[in-house]
Image (cartoon, helix red, strand yellow):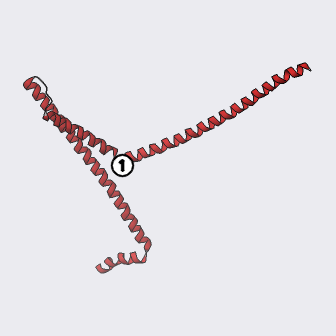
Amino acid sequence: MKWFSLLLPLLLKQLSPALATLNQSSLQLREDVSLKARKVALLTLTGIAAMILFSGGLLLSLWEAARQLDSFNTLQFNAVISTGVGLAVISIVALIIAFRSWPGVQARKQRLRQERAQLRAQREQLGQAVSLDQAVAMLILDFVKEREQKRHTNAPLAQES
């Protein structure tokens, strides 16, 4: 019975290509989901590590500043304070990179870019339509002015006769 259960899937794959493609598509879906889950987990861990580094850098800088103020009543920028500030800055940059590469943020940015492009295209079409309307209106006004000028030039001739 064990041999039959081992051979049955092999026979079904050979006999039915639809089942084989279903299995392939499910494997592809599984790979896609696992890749996205890995990316989200990596970005989350990067964010947590960046927050820990930021807290550590800020704490280190504040601790050294407090020690200097208690001991010497002055504050001097030394290696310990610069290391703390450096850690804080590096962690902020890491947070920005992590949140900018979040999967939903990129899709949203792309969607916003497409919407802006559509709005620009609509504005251009409206601008062309408005300019076309203005051109037709100018043509009509020019025609009306020419007719008025002809009337004025023909009116003295009609009065003389």
Q: Position of residue 95 (x, y in %)?
A: 28, 42
Residue at 45% in and 45% down: 111
- Please give left or right for residue 78 compared with residue 113 in the image: left
Q: Is residue 131 above or below residue 1?
A: above
Question: Looking at the picture, which amino acid does disc 1 mark?
Answer: Pro
Q: Residue furthest left?
A: 71
- Please give left or right for residue 144 compared with residue 4 in the image: right
Residue at 39% in and 75% down: 13
Quadrant position of the C terminus in the picture: top right
Residue at 23% in and 40% down: 90
- Taking depth in this image into account, of 107 and 133 the one nearest to the observer is 133
Q: Position of residue 9 (x, y in %)?
A: 36, 75
Give the mark count. 1
Q: Position of residue 160 (x, y in %)?
A: 90, 19
Q: Residue furthest right?
A: 161
Residue at 28% in and 47% down: 44
- Taking depth in this image into account, of 19 and 139 the one nearest to the observer is 139
Q: Which residue is mark 1?
A: 103
- Taking depth in this image into account, of 149 and 114 the one nearest to the observer is 149
**Picture quarter containing residue 27?**
bottom left
- Taking depth in this image into account, of 124 and 25 the one nearest to the observer is 124
Q: Position of residue 127 (x, y in %)?
A: 59, 36
Neighbour class for label 1 at 10 Å: few (<14), some, many (≥20)?
few
